Every structure is written in C-alpha cells, then in structure tokens.
Image (spheres, helix red, strand yellow):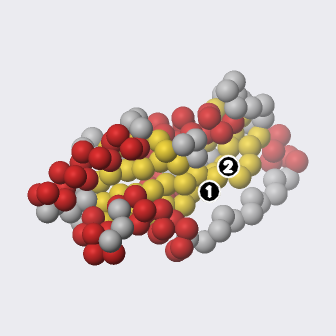
Amino acid sequence: MQPADQALNSPTTRSRRQGDLMALLWIEVELLTHLGPAPDGGMREAVAQALGARLQHRVRRTDLVFQVGDTGFAVLLDADKAGAELVEKRLSEQLRGPYGMGRSQAHVHISIGLAISSEACRQGSGLVQCAMDDVYTHRPTPPAPAPLAVADAANSV
C-alpha cells in the first residue's frame, strides 16, 4: 500500500486533465471489541494489517489501495457513481469482520465515504475532502458492541 498523499496526486491530476470519472472511497475503521491477548505490536496495528489485506483482495487490480494513518484506508476507483456505490456496498459487507489474529479476535465498525471526481469539482472541493465529508456527515455512529455471554467468549477464541 502507498502513502495517501503520493498515491492520489498523479491519478487525480491525470483524471482531471483527461476528463475521466474517478471515485474515492474513504474508509474509517473503529475497533469495537477484541477477545484474547493482543498480538505483538498492538491490536490496532494487527487489525489494520488484517483489514488492509482483506481490502486489497476485494478490489480490482487496477484500483489503488492505501492506508491513511493507523485507522483509515482509501481506495481510488476508475468508476462512475453507480459502480462506486456498488463497490462501497460490497466492501461495507465484506470488511465488517470479525478479524482473527492468532489467538485473538477483533470486531470493527466500518464507515465508508464516497466521492466522485465530477461532483467534487462542482463543489469546489478536492476528492479526498468530499469523501471525508461523506463519512462524517452521512454515516450513522457505530453500534455498541453486543455483550458476549461468558460461554460464547470462551468458545470464540
């Protein structure tokens, strides 16, 4: 995965010049619960690695995936709005979890924002800003994790 600032500059500039449609999915991850011992390096890092690997395998080879900070990802798609919405829906279901890491298991909440290059230009904002705004203005807050019965917790690892 590439750093976000480097990965976005070239494709978005080229897209703007050529008039191509491009979409950006901005993915925020929140760790809800985890069971078992934390992996070496910490639970957040382990979840980010596991989610990044899952994300990389769920998109096309032509899509660019990169990590943003330690709790976010971005996916640059060569797609129109309908295609990007379909990918958003699919990823929302597939990235939900749980994530097993050795003897640990984590549950996460995923929020995805979507921006389309033509709409971002009309609003006078950048693609990244529009996708981030979509996450924070149109998404529900994460659900509270369901309490696990003691027997379920013991059997889930």
Where, quadrant-wise, is the N terminus in this rendering?
Answer: top left
Which one is in front, 108 or 139? 139
Q: Amino acid at mark 1?
A: His
Residue 98 image offset from top left, x and y in percent: 62, 47
Helix, strand or loop for disc 2: strand
User: Where in the figure is residue 112, as x and y percent of width and height?
Assistant: 49, 61
Where is 59 relative to 90, above or below? above
Label 2 sits on residue: 31
The residue indicated by pointer 1 is 109
Q: In the picture provided, is 18 more to the left or to the right than 93?
A: left
Label whose residue precedes the other's in the sequence (1 or 2): 2
Q: Amino acid at mark 2?
A: Leu
Residues under numbered marks 1 and 2 in contact, where contact means CB atoms less than 8 Å apart: no
Residue shown at the point (36%, 67%) measured from the top left: 125
Q: Residue at x 41, y 66 (%)?
A: 130
User: Which element type, helix, strand or loop, lies under badge 1?
Assistant: strand
| Residue that extends furthest to the left in the rendered view of this protein | 18
Label 2 Cα crowd, 10 Å radius (few <14 / some 14-19 / many 20+): some
Give how far apart the Cα atoms at labels 1 and 2 are. Answer: 6 Å
Q: Is residue 24 visible?
A: yes
